[in-house]
Structures are given as structure tokens and as C-alpha cells.
Image: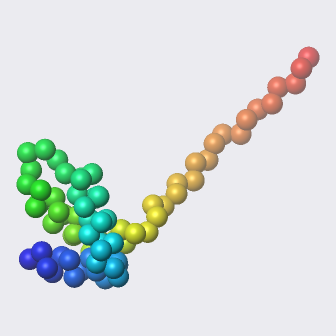
Amino acid sequence: MRSDLIFGALSHVSNRYQLCQLASKATRKLHKPNTRLQDTANEVMVRFRTTNPGAPAPVQNVVSAPVEHRRAA
């Protein structure tokens, strides 16, 4: 049931208003055409139950190759 999904998502977000805002943004971004909006919203709540939606995304460290400096002849 959706209420179970909402209470599971509230374990990571303490404010219900913030949960509603995050869920609506995520539902808009993840929704696929020709699918039910309710199914997408339920999928978002399942994702929110396992991860913290308010946490910043992890930054990936990009290791670049050392730049070779040329000397003038």
C-alpha cells in the first residue's frame, strides 16, 4: 500500500512537506510516457525508502592524465 511506502520514506526525510516536494520533482523526472503516473510515484517512494533523497549526490573524482610541458628550442 502507498501509506507503507510513505512511512518508509519518512525514515529519511523528517518533514512531510519536503517529502512531497522531493517526490513530485522525482516523479516528473522519472515518468515515462505510456505508463501510469501512480506507478511512477510508487516507484519513487520505493527508492526513497532505501536512500536519502535530500542528500547531495556523490561527487565523482575525475583523474586527469598529467599534462606534458614542452620546452622551447
Residue extending furthest toward the front: 17
Residue at image point 14% right, 79% down: 3
Residue 63 spot, x, y in % from top left: 61, 47
Residue at image point 31% right, 82% down: 11
Q: Is residue 4 left or right of residue 66?
A: left
Residue at image point 30% right, 74% down: 17
Which quadrant of the figure has residue 66?
top right
Q: Is 38 located above or below residue 67 in the figure?
A: below
Residue extending furthest toward the top: 73
* Quarter of the image with the C terminus in it: top right
Number of callouts:
0
Q: Is residue 47 visible?
A: no
Q: Is 46 located above or below residue 65 in the figure?
A: below
Residue 12 spot, x, y in % from top left: 34, 78
* Quarter of the image with the N terminus in it: bottom left
Q: How is the image coloured?
A: rainbow
Residue 27 spot, x, y in % from top left: 23, 57
Q: Is residue 5 visible?
A: yes
Residue at image point 43% right, 69% down: 55
Q: Is residue 56 left or right of residue 73?
A: left
